[in-house]
Image (spheres, rainbow, N blue to C red):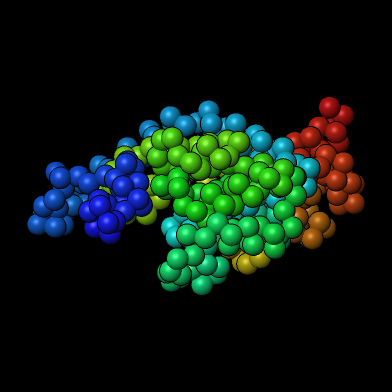
Amino acid sequence: MTSTDNQPDPLRRELDTLTTEAYRAELAEIDRLPTLEIAATMNGEDSAVPAAVAAQLPSIAAAIDAVAARMAEGGRLVYAGAGTAGRLGVLDASECPPTFNTAPGQVVGLIAGGPDALVSSVEGAEDHPDLAVRDLDALALTERDAVVGISASGRTPYALGAVRHARRLGALTVGLSCNAGSPLAAAAEHGIEVVVGPELLTGSTRLKAGTAQKLVLNMISTITMIRLGKTYGNLMVDVRASNEKLRARSRRIVSLATGAPDPEIEAALAATGGEVKDAILVVLAGVDAARAARLLADSRGHLRTALQDALGG
């Protein structure tokens, strides 16, 4: 107890109202269970997460369409969060360049406390919305950008500060939380509240809440990139072949898209400097590398559109 009237402090009272912080008396003896039974319990808890995400699909889809529209005009996707939520945002952002060949800075992950917070706790950083303002100002945020605030509780000051500041600047805002009626969702144009219920360990929101956030972030980045033409069907045709595994994957993708023999695939990739989209156009449309590049530029990188243009509709 910290207040003079012998009542819990305001933050503790707030935590008492959050679904993600609820205490589950039925699990009070979990530490006495056999390991297999604990694992089965955790697995059962996790199985409820996809259904909670499914309940928010209309909100998720609306947010994705809005993000994709901004990015199609040259905007950026920026994630902002603290602790586990921030780390998940940074993870999702860091996977976009090798997977979708995004330009440096096109998808950005901000975490309260900066890069050091990725591997260790930076005490108190999440409590300062002004730090989010500073981090966004360092990016020179514009109205073409989209900012996704991530917070399991939906009340983290850093995430709230990011969304509120971004909205003042005219950027698109999305609030992703795991509690209904959250301040974060209310502050954003697009609120996504994936209510997964109380955690196995009280308040450990790296568990179900973290899993839910990861699933939603997967959707936001992946479907946005599909909308931006970063795929051809379900093939990652914008993959960046920066190592041997990815070079082998590039050859396989061209093979799957075209059915061409290996020598033709190798020749197309060599002619296009290893660019998978260009190589597919060379093979399927019978154009040279320069023509393939022009077709893709005219179609803003959409391979299906470029192929239709090359083949006359």
Q: Quadrant of residue 305?
A: top right
Q: What is the x, y in percent for residue 37?
A: 15, 50
For the question of whether residue 27 can be seen, the reply is: yes
Residue 122, percent from left and from top: 46, 70
225 vs 190, nearest the viewer: 190
Q: In which quarter of the image is the N terminus?
A: bottom left
Q: Quadrant of the C terminus?
A: top right
The structure residue drawn at horizontal position 63% and vertical position 57%, both measured from the top left corner, is 133
Q: Is residue 195 left or right of residue 59?
A: left
* Vertical order, 171 against 30 (above or below): above
Q: Between 245 and 302, which is closer to the camera in this rendering?
A: 302
How many discs appear? 0
Give percent across and percent down for residue 102.
Answer: 69, 54
Residue at the spot x=40%, y=40% of the render? 179
Residue at (66%, 36%) from the top-left corner?
66
Foreground residue among 152 and 66: 152
151 relative to 48 in the view: left or right: right
Single out the residue that lies furthest toward the front. Answer: 4
Judge whether residue 208 can be spotted in this image.
no
Q: Residue at x 55, y 68 (%)?
A: 114
Q: Could you tell me residue 180's position as x and y percent? A: 41, 35
